[in-house]
Image: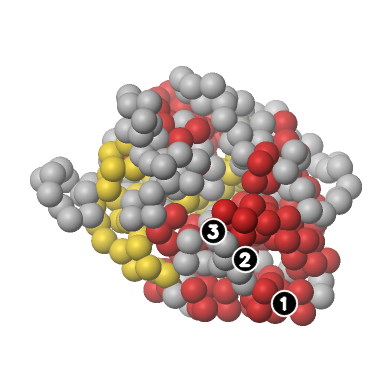
Amino acid sequence: MTERRKIIIDTDPGQDDAAALMLAFASPDEVEILGICTVAGNVPLKLTSRNARIICELCNRTDISVYEGADRPIKRQLVTAEHVHGKTGLDGAVLDEPTMKVMPQHAVDFIIETLRREPEGSVTLCTLGPLTNIGMALTKAPDIAPRIRELVLMGGGFFEGGNITPAAEFNIYVDPQAADIVFRAGIPLIMMPLDVTHQLMTTKARVSRLAAIGSRPAMVMVDWLAFFERFDEEKYGSDGGPLHDPTVIAYLLKPELFSGRHCNVEIETQSELTVGMTVVDWWRVSKRAPNTRVMRHVDADGFFDLLIERFARL
């Protein structure tokens, strides 16, 4: 039995964010969700907040508080991804509008207050979208950095390159300034780049196992994935699309599914050509101190076995 980890999930839902949230909801023995923070990313903030609450209600988890965060990046104009996720961010299934309310407190203040209140080194931050809220919290309250146990993020790419530009992965590209703050903060970082997520394809065989569960959350996820996959199938010519964000939660549940190495990672914030690039010193040529555990490989079958087993509990 592993210990139960206290986590804050910072997210911009998205169908793959929904899969990550649902994986966390289905794993109460391993993770205690202190709150869900929303950020502008895949779609604007009002929609990411709506979507987070829809997912909570779908899984009967209205006991979890949702806090709204930043509606735009620290310095840049907001870039969104409706071309991938649809105009709502959760296209593919029609669900009722949420009735649960967002909390009155701003997500940045919730993050700061929670990290100051909880014992030092006890809270893990799980980031599934742009790092704006975390960057703002660290700027406003630098004292919280040493209190964070770990920050596990879906973001970046190295051998795979980028997915929004040739060099940049979407989450980092949306707010490279925030990512730069986070990567320089001295926090233990675990990075789930495209190099890992592109190994996790929602093949027809895997999706049919999910559909066989037959529950409402599972069937809604099947519909969401059918919509979400179409973009990647067209782009990569693949059977299914990569499932990015659940890697963050899967790592907390079964870290042995993943392998990588400790490297220095810096964020490009200046160059128009490569802005948002995660410059990973995989071969340790720069002599810069390692600051991030960069994952490179994943046991894809083990990952989907975990996902499907947990979805059956919802």
Q: Which mark is residue 236?
A: 3
Real-space Cα separation, disc 3 to disc 1, in angstroms: 21 Å
- Taking the image as drawn, is residue 137 in sight? no
Residue under the image location 48 percent in, 22 percent down: 76
List the residue tagged with mark 2. Answer: 240
Q: Amino acid at mark 2?
A: Gly
Q: Residues within 10 Å of mark 1 (few under 14, many from 20)?
A: few
Comparing 220 with 309, the one in front is 220
What residue would you read off at disc 1? Answer: 208
Q: Are marks 2 and 1 in contact (CB under 8 Å)?
A: no
Q: CA distance from mark 3 to mark 2?
A: 9 Å
Q: Which of label 2 and label 1 is nearer to you?
A: 2
Q: Secondary structure at mark 3?
A: helix
Q: Residues within 10 Å of mark 3 (few under 14, many from 20)?
A: few
Q: Residue at point 49% right, 74% down?
A: 300
Left or right, 213 with respect to 262, comes to right
